[in-house]
């Protein structure tokens, strides 16, 4: 697992998400974040888009296929 602090992992995950889905899509999605879904969005960006998507078992090119 990525040993960086949570904020760095979140930021890296958000960058990966933008690279894969496009900035416009992600910006629109992030604009809809509210108190209800904030923690879930943080989890997705940190763990899914950083730890899993960029982890050693998942190569971005292959994952996109």
Image: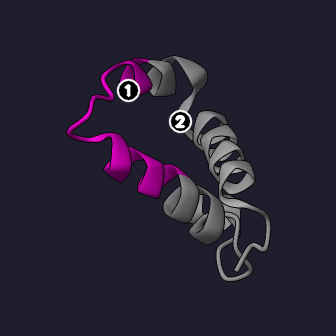
Q: Which residues are magenta?
A: 28-45
In the rendered view of the protein, which quadrant contains the C terminus? bottom right
**Measured from the top left, where is residue 59 in percent x and y?**
70, 69
**Measured from the top left, where is residue 49 in percent x and y?**
56, 56
Q: Is residue 31 above or below residue 19?
A: above
| Pointer 1 local density, CA inside 10 Å: few below 14, some 14–19, many at least 20 | few
Q: Is residue 57 above or below residue 30?
A: below
**Measured from the top left, where is residue 36 in percent x and y?**
20, 39
Q: Is residue 57 above or below residue 5?
A: below
Q: Write the residue at 70% across / 73% down.
A: 55
Q: Write the residue at 65% across / 74% down.
A: 58
- Residue 65 visible at all: no
For label 2, the residue is 21
For label 1, the residue is 29
Is label 2 in contact with label 1 (beta carbons under 8 Å)?
no
| Mark 2 element type | helix
Identify the image quadrant of residue 23: top right
């Amino acid at each position: 697992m990525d040993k960086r602090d949570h904020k760095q992992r979140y930021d890296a995950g958000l960058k990966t998400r933008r690279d894969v889905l496009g900035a416009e899509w992600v910006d629109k999605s992030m604009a809809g974040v509210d108190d209800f879904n904030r923690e879930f969005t943080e989890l997705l960006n940190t763990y899914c888009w950083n730890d899993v998507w960029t982890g050693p078992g998942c190569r971005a090119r292959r994952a996109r296929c």
